[in-house]
Image (cartoon, rainbow, N blue to C red):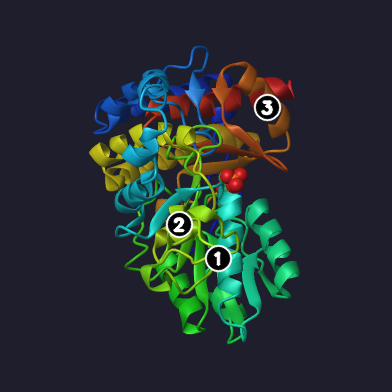
Amino acid sequence: MTHDTRDPRPALDSSTAAGSSTAADSLLELATALDASDPLGAHLDAFAPAPGVTAYLDGNSLGRPLRDIPERLAAFARDDWGTRLIRSWDEQWMALPMALGDRIGALTLGAAAGQTVVADSTSVLIYKLMRAALAHDPSRAELVIETGNFPTDRFLAEGVAAETGATIRWIEPDPVLGVQVADVGAVVSERTALVSLSHVDYRSGALADMPAITAAAHDAGALMMWDLCHSAGVVPMQLDEWGVDLAVGCTYKYLNGGPGSPAFAYLRRSLQGVLRQPIQGWWSAADIFAMGPEYVPAGDIRQLLSGTPPVTSMLAMQGMLDLIEQATIDAVRAKSESLTDLAVRAHDELLAPLGVRLLSPRDAALRGGHVTIGHPDFRAVTQRLWADGIVPDFRFPDGIRLGLSPLSTSFVETVTGVIAVRDALESHER
Ligand SMILES: *Cc1c(COP(=O)(O)O)cnc(C)c1O
């Protein structure tokens, strides 16, 4: 499988005004037809309208709110909190981190109940799990990560290595295709404690081969942790079946939990009570209300909690989980592949002639839910687009990510966004 960062097609006359509007028109026609036959199209209306926004292409960073969020928040303030008051802890909130974890596990992760919990932020959960994994076997003191991983993952690894005396083994993957099994095979050994990677690369959108890489880590006797921030809710997976040990992910991206909604962590059942996480607050104790003299960790998934969970921040994601349950994660993935295929095609026809490079894998099976394109003028172009109500995001040094959240994004919106990128680029050049 090769990738190209150049346009494979000869430069067409589509850079002329007449040619490009023809290409844009036929892409819009195609998008209209795809929307008309989209089995998930009816769900678009579940999201709150955003006045002034014509194309929201950043659902991979911050998912849109559902239409009923104001009512859900008001009911919470009025009833669960306002009327039931502290009784709500017993009635529902105590169990919420585990109950929501089980739903996320069942609907999106391929995880049986009792192995997923909602808590903290992704960064804090990565810290807890990395520390737990490195304390597990003193004969193993190496941590494998990659240079292209999201900054928080790399920074946390450096901090954990400094605290524990562990050595980091860096993988330098292909920037477009991401980490391959052979890259992992080349660095793991009997000294490896943990391999920690992202399932979908936050920049290129490359989708890692989770079962094969997990198996390669296990062949060396290491534990395997996956960061699922850019795949939870858009790429189906089978954590149980694939033998994954540990995983963390965001709920404010494709799970639409709202800004700062807490993260989730997965800990395989056979490791519960075996690994010890370092922030052993009272919520992780065997008996929360025993108020005993010393700490005894809970034997189940609750051992990953630390303190009082952020209940208010766990409200919005519940409606999105209902929606994913109705739609099914496999149908979400099918639409996601069609959306990213259309974005790649629109790039080829409208943007490549202007010197834009495709920075994501060309094969949909090797991509997650976003497509990244590059051009030196994209920082200025993004500012212009945001002002015009077209909202993708910019990633240093010169990438625009087109994040296509399948339940809230239409095909026409996708093409409209790419046409706007072309128009902004052309007027910027003038
Ligand atoms: C978004 C993202 C994070 C964010 O971590 P927070 O603690 O929620 O800020 C971490 N890792 C990856 C791969 C991400 O994409």
Above or below, 149 relative to 222:
above
Q: Which one is closest to the eye, mark 2 or mark 3?
A: 2
The residue lying at 48 percent from left, 51 percent from top is 362
Identified at 30% across, 35% down, the residue is 323
The residues bearing labels 2 and 3 have C-alpha atoms spaced at a distance of: 58 Å
Q: Which residue is mark 1?
A: 294
- In x, y percent, where is residue 17? 57, 20
Query: Residue at the top extreme?
Result: 51
Q: Which residue is mark 3?
A: 381
Q: Earlier in the sequence, mark 1 or mark 3?
A: 1
Residue that carries the numbered disc 2 in the rendered image? 290
Identified at 47% across, 32% down, the residue is 312
Mark 2 beta carbon near ligand 1 (under 8 Å): no
Report the residue at 54% width, 31% height from top. Answer: 350
Label 3, secondary structure: give it. helix
Name the residue type under label 3.
Val
Disc 2 marks which amino acid? Answer: Ala
